[in-house]
Image (cartoon, coloured by chain):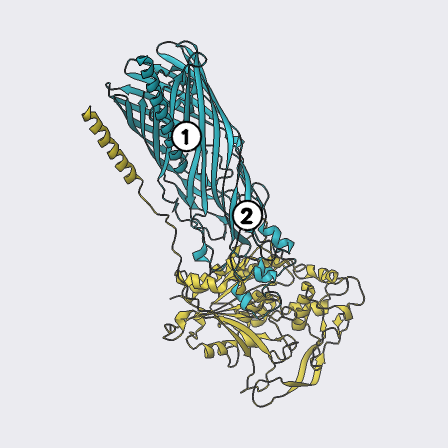
Amino acid sequence: MVKYIKIAFVVSALAVIVLLTGCTDRGTNTPVAPTLPYWGISPKLFVFADTISNPYAPQLIFQIRNPLGILKTAVYVPKVGWPPPHGEGRPLPLVILLAPQDGDEFFYFNHGLRELADEMIARGEIDPMVICCVSNDQVFGGYFYGNSYPAGFYDDIIGSLKDFRLLSYLYTNYPFLINSAEKRGIGGIGQGAYGAFRACIIHPGVFTSITAVDGPLDFDGSDNNHGLIDLFDDALIEQGLLNNDSIRYKFDSLSNWSLSRMFIGGSMAFSPHDTNITYHFTWEGGQFQQPTINVTARDTIADEATLVTNVITDINPAKKLDFHLPFDKTGIPYDLIWSMWLRNNLDSLHEAAGGSPLNGLNMWIATSPQAYRNFHDMTMSWIDFLFDQGYQPDTLIYRGYHGKPAYKNVYIYDLMRHILIFHDNNFGD
Amino acid sequence: MDKLFSSQYIMEIRMGFIRLTASIILAFTLLTPGLFASGFETTGLGLKARGMGGAFRALANDWTAAYYNPAGYAFVYDNQLGANVGVMHLRNELTPDYRLGSNYELGFFNDQTIYNHHEIYTMPSAGFLVRLPFWGETVFGLSVYQPFDYSISWTLYRTPFAYNDSVLSQLPYNQYRNNLDVVAFQLTAAREFIEDKFSIGIGLQLLRGDLVFNNLYMRENPLDSTTYPDVLSDRPYDKIPEFTKNDGNGWGFGLKGGMLWKLNDKMSVAFTASIPFDITIKGTTAINFIMPRNNGLITDTDTTGYQPGKIGYLFAIGDPISFQSDFETKLKLPPSVGAGFTYEVNDKLQLAFDVEYTFWSRFEGFEFYYSGFGPLPLDSMAIVKNFFTHNLTNPVEWNNAGKVMAGCRYEYNENITFLGGISADQSSIRDGIGFMPQFVDTGDKYGFNAGVLFNIQRWEIGLVSSFYVYPDITIYNATDLDGDYNADQFPGVYKASTFETILAFNYWF
């Protein structure tokens, strides 16, 4: 009997050993989080004045409530770019991101750009890069990064390689940037997408890559009869002015009239009442202090059918900010003015530039059928145009998840991952 | 007189032994965590029963008949005391694919094979039976076992850096956890109605339910973009993680019944039924919201909407919000019916075959009703208070499940008996609706059991090992089943296997 008891215990002990060995601890296999440097971002307030060739340059000085002509930016700088002991002094490429309507210089950072870039760099998904985020105007939400006295001369500011423009300021302030077109990218969403393409068309060869997400990339849409045109009556309805004779002195820019503000900003850029201003600065002490502008002469558009006058005012009465809407009181396009807008359409700018100004530019365009303001149709139309012209842009069609459509800027966080990877791929080694 | 005295003395010794043993069993069972089979039913108990794959209803000849078929007690002619302990390891894997709209990451460890936390569970049970001279001769038994048990936990989530980069060390380890125990204290009585032919037995159960249920709810950000700035609810701030840990218990009742009919010397058939009633679980809940941290907004120059005391600040500063509440939920346990057949081939070999059908559709998951909240921030604002105090649900849509079992028992000699069995067990979650990491029952599974039993004088000592093979299951979407904007199933690829060994002894007296 003792023999059986011994056998029983031996067998049981062996079984328990086998069981415990078979049930080895595998851990949980959860991935390890990378350690991020948390280097932060650098807000910069750039003032544009070409003090050499044009001591009193007007780039942004006529903008309402921007008396110093400031372009606000916030710059993400990976730690490795700074010289030792803070960093490694590594040469870095540059990406410029333009904000959409109402977006300030923190727009992309408020959607997680800094942490995303830190994480992607830490994981080796992208190489380190400097990212300069440019604010859109905050009064009307933006001027389409267009070109006029009241809107500012963004064509000169954003894409130009001349001194005292955005790029030159960045290369001065961040000397570790690689000053080469092959290491320079640009992008934007909404008005920022339009502004980025506009800069690339007007300044061919300055950038190697562009990323654009749903925006007014073809003002009259795929059939030349929609796009922004569909929004004309919506803007009037927004203010209760549809078929109202008083639009010329009532069409206003309250903060919750987003559509109206977009058309006011666009009108300031594309159809301002004053088309040419002769001005004179008085500058004090050789420093950036509030300049006094003396307007000496104005050329104006003679037509008054769509003129909105004396609605938008500035503390400086010299900034006379009247403008022409591209539609009449019924929401129908007013051809004389609308044609001025269409001259700023990207396909028109492309044609005006001659040849193939986007050759050599690597393009990535994302669009969602759920985008607001007909941006999807306008974006698709621009994509078709690019293909017709022989370009080969990469495209991404995206949608939101159930209950969260891809409206406005909801998914910019997710798109930024694609954007950074695209630019990184085009920067090469 | 001496003889009578001697009998009383022996009886007192026996009763004292029984009381002492029962006390030890109760303490042992209540203090030890346990486990599961289909749904969250345990794999069973007892050496012979488990060794034969659970095909034991028509055999039912030891104290574990309380679980399989109380009628079997009537044909047990000696008193018995027994106990066993199951040692189990759930070796599961989950490769999450938890993205919203198939594209949008929330922080789950997608495409990475994650293992459930390593835990070796023990599942003890014990009981005794005595034949007493009531109503003729009736066999009574008291047993303690776990008819339902499940325990598993996972770490599956980390907040994206862009959502909140300051809380990584504060995330709970047991993010998805289910430790559900139902212990039955069962008083069993059985007697023969046709001598050596037919018996009926019933069991009255006092059920004790214990629940620790941790879950992560990705709550819809309540700040509507038509009222509040878009940036507060744009991606990645669209979903706010709410970790909950519900810890409570409750009591209920249950019934078991069965009949056993010996057709002849070689064949027996049995029919059984089990009816557990609902258990109301009450306890406390630790609630932890991981709030969005938007560094840009807080450090921006805007001082109007993002100062302390403002809703914009609350939803951008990123401070976790933790508080406690009371909770109540209903545990709806499934009834089941079963039948068994046994055939004695010869003096050494016995075969058994059982079927069981469990009405798992009765289990509807958990609806947690909260009350008695701790201090809340900005609770004067309805939108905030409603968000933080919302009741939470984990609905499931399970199916009734069948199980077939076959086993054999071979008496090698008077001291050694070999046991073997197989089982095929339908999954209660086989269509995947409401599949969550807290209940990993990936599909129809097959069990293989083998063991050896040593008969040493009045003792039976033995060991059984079991292995369960599961199919893989892929859950495709984070579907909201009840329209509360919270996902009620966790998408990903689930794999499972289970190892179990049972050590047991019985003592006849």
- Quadrant where the C terminus of chain B is found in the figure: top left
Quarter assignment of residue A99: bottom right
- Quadrant where the N terminus of chain B is found in the figure: top left
* The furthest residue to the front: B1
Front residue of B227 and A405:
B227
Kind of residue at badge 1: Tyr
- Please tell me the numbered disc located at residue B145: 1
Front residue of A299 and A214:
A214
Query: The numbered mark 1 sits on a residue in which chain?
Result: B
Q: Position of residue A139 (x, y in %)?
A: 65, 71
Q: Is residue B38 visible?
A: no
Number of numbered discs visible in the structure rendering: 2
Q: Which chain is cyan?
A: B
Residue for point 42% across, 44% down: B153
The reply to whether callout 2 and callout 1 are in contact (CB within 8 Å) is no
Residue under pointer 2: B325
Looking at the rendered structure, the secondary structure element under dot 2 is: strand
Q: Is residue A423 left or right of residue B368?
A: left
Quarter assignment of residue B188: top left
Q: Position of residue B336 (x, y in %)?
A: 48, 25
Q: Earlier in the sequence, mark 2 or mark 1?
A: 1
Query: The numbered mark 2 sits on a residue in which chain?
Result: B
Q: Which chain is yellow?
A: A
Q: Position of residue B125 (x, y in %)?
A: 38, 30
Label 1 crowd (10 A; few <14 / some 14-19 / many >=20): many
* The furthest residue to the left: A3
Front residue of A396 and B323:
B323
Instruction: Tell me, yes or no, whether dots 2 and 1 are on the same chain.
Output: yes
Q: Is residue B265 visible?
A: yes
Kind of residue at badge 2: Ser
Looking at the rendered structure, the secondary structure element under dot 1 is: strand
